[in-house]
Image (tube, helix red, strand yellow):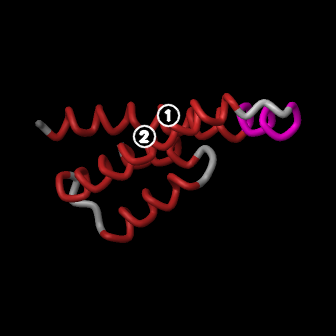
């Protein structure tokens, strides 16, 4: 896979992971705790978990291809844990 294809794929994974995180935090979790409806957390949480793993794997694959420093990789991985973080990473590093 070419570097541009990897970057494009990671960009989409980053955007989708960020959206899934926001939906989980601001939609599914309030539905669970304020309206006693845990069902959305099950589905959104599963999707977010899969996208999170894809995000981490994608960042590790791009680490060598993009010649990032270990500090950059640590920053990119850390920002996957922060709401809106993947959007920032997508704009700054891609």
* In contact (CB < 8 Å): disc 1 and disc 2: yes
Q: Nearer the viewer, residue 49 or 18?
A: 49
Query: Residue 25's quadrant in the figure?
Result: top right
Q: Which mark is residue 29?
A: none
Number of marks in the rendered image: 2
Query: Residue 51's quadrant in the figure?
Result: top left
Query: Can you name the residue that lies furthest to the bottom here?
Result: 71
Picture coordinates of residue 82, whole percent (x, y): 60, 53
Q: Is residue 46 left or right of residue 64?
A: right
Magenta stretch contains residue 23 = no
Q: Residues within 10 Å of mark 1 (few under 14, many from 20)?
A: some
Q: Is residue 36 left or right of residue 73?
A: right
Q: Which residues are magenta?
A: 26-35
Residue lying at 32% horizontally and 70% vertically, measured from the top left: 70
Kind of element beneath mark 2:
helix
Kind of element beneath mark 1:
helix
Picture coordinates of residue 49, whole percent (x, y): 48, 43
- For mark 1, what is the residue? 47
Q: Which mark is residue 50?
A: 2
Query: Residue 36's quadrant in the figure?
Result: top right
């Amino acid at each position: 896979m070419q570097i541009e294809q990897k970057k494009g794929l990671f960009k989409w994974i980053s955007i989708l992971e960020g959206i899934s995180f926001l939906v989980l935090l601001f939609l599914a979790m309030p539905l669970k705790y304020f309206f006693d409806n845990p069902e959305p957390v099950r589905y959104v949480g599963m999707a977010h978990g899969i996208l999170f793993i894809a995000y981490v794997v994608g960042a590790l694959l791009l680490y060598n291809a993009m010649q990032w420093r270990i500090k950059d990789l640590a920053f990119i991985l850390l920002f996957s844990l922060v709401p809106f973080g993947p959007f920032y990473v997508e704009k700054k590093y891609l």
